[in-house]
Amino acid sequence: MTTQKTLNLFYRGLCWLLLFAPLHLTAQDAISITFDPLPDLCIDDTVNCTGTVSYDFQVGVDCPFGQLQVDAFLNIFNDGSLIPIANALSGSYPAYSLSGSYPLGQHSFEVVVDDGCGNIQTAVLPFEVTDCAVSMPVCSIGILVELTLDYETGLETGPQAYLSYQDVLAQPVFDCTPPVTYSINFEGEAVDPAQDSVLLDCDREGTQVLELHAQDALGNSNSCVAFVWVQNNSGYQCEGDFFGINGQVMTEDGEPVAGVPVALSGQASEVHPTNENGAFVLSNAIAGLDYTVTPQYDEAHLNGVSTLDMILISQHILGLQPLDSPYKRIAADTNGSGHISTLDLIQLRRMILGIESTFDNVSSWRFVDAAYVFPNPANPWEAPFPEVININNLGTAVSIGNDFIAIKIGDVNGDAETEL
Ligand SMILES: [Ca+2]
Ligand SMILES: [Ca+2]
Ligand SMILES: [Ca+2]
């Protein structure tokens, strides 16, 4: 071989070396970490509020002779702190997996691969644990609802009852995203998250199917079904036409008077006391007939009677300070004579002194039809004022608003006790 040939071979070899050596070095550097990003994970432990993660990744190295080292870290809530999680890492070259249970929120794994040939590569594997459900609420069983008649509105509505979600919910739902709110509706009706009760009435007598919905703060919802037995033992019939008469007994100042027996007479009889709102309802009536409603109370004559009332009545008699309403004037007529005189004062004095305990000619309370307009308020006795309400030919439904103004005899300043 000539020197020239030897040189030629040397240069060709050098060229090959120059051409391929850098490529070879570059290839030796490469470490690949590949993975498919995880979709959001739903929590599967609703007690600890964690989601189970299983994250696969693949490693590729071009230096097969080094001591390969794969390390994994957790960047919880992506707050930047890297926690070693060797136990969470499994697999062997080239396929690995990271797993574990992690709390609600956005996190990431950081994988560090050292090929043992002086090359290090890292990769960030992000993931998120979300709340995408709420547990199914538990509905009570054997729910019985009794319809009742409201004294004030009952004659217009019939017997009713409200059923709240609390009556149906057997136990509250725990959720990872509180607060949990509840709503209730009849089966088949639109769900309204704000509806916390349902109204039951005569149309709902018998078995009703209700849905109770639980909703977490993210709007996830779940429901249970409750069977409710609706009963009407109110004494007011649901079937057929509904009859009744109601009203209210109040003082001139609008204060309800409770415990006043109100009697129905005429073609049926019945007595009901007014409730704490002064309201009464009489239901024995039958349509088409005539009735009279009469409140009556004749006890506790001294209720609200004091020397102050005597002073006010004397000022009225003297013309210094006339009593300013027909009701006060009726109250001042303590002997029931139909006018106000010193005899009324004498009657009051005898009672205050304990010589007498009752008014002689009037009951302790009088009740005037609230709709009655006195033709001459200065003289309420100018025409007889109605102390009953007559209902002639009761309509096919009900008669409402049969109200009375209550007057405590002898009490002109209105301080009598109204819980009778
Ligand atoms: Ca939830
Ligand atoms: Ca009198
Ligand atoms: Ca008084």
Image (cartoon, rainbow, N blue to C red):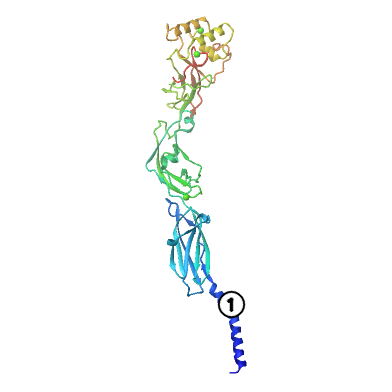
Left or right relative to 221: residue 140:
left
Question: Residue 156 versus residue 199: which sits nearer the camera?
Answer: 199
Question: Can residue 360 be seen here?
Answer: no
Q: Is mark 1 within 8 Å of ligand 1?
A: no
Quadrant containing the C terminus is top left
Give above or below for 98 relative to 289.
Answer: below
Apparent side of residue 35 relative to residue 7 in the rendered image (left or right): left
Extreme-front residue of the structure: 3
Q: What number of labels is visible?
A: 1
Q: Does 364 appear above or below 122?
A: above
- Please name whichever residue, 212 or 406, is drawn nearer the observer in this view of the structure: 212
Q: In front: 187, or 72?
A: 72
Q: Residue furthest left?
A: 142
* Picture residue at 58% right of the left edge, 80% below the top: 20
Name the spot of residue 373 as percent of width and height, x first.
Answer: 56, 18
Residue that sits furthest to the bottom in the current view? 1
Residue 185, position in %: x, y?
47, 43
The quadrant in which residue 87 appears is bottom left
Question: Does residue 354 show up?
Answer: yes
Amino acid type of the residue tagged 1 in the rendering: Pro
- Residue 197 versus residue 74 in the image, above or below: above
Residue at 39 percent across and 33 percent down: it is 233
Residue 18 figure quarter: bottom right
User: Label 1: how many residues lie within 10 Å, few (<14), some (14-19) or many (20+)?
Assistant: few
The residue under label 1 is 22
In the rendered image, residue 318, in percent from the top left (x then y), is placed at 57, 5
Is the N terminus in the top left, top right, bottom left or bottom right quadrant?
bottom right
Q: Secondary structure at mark 1?
A: helix
Residue 113 lies, in percent from the top left, at 50, 67
**Residue visible at 51% across and 11% down in the picture:** 308
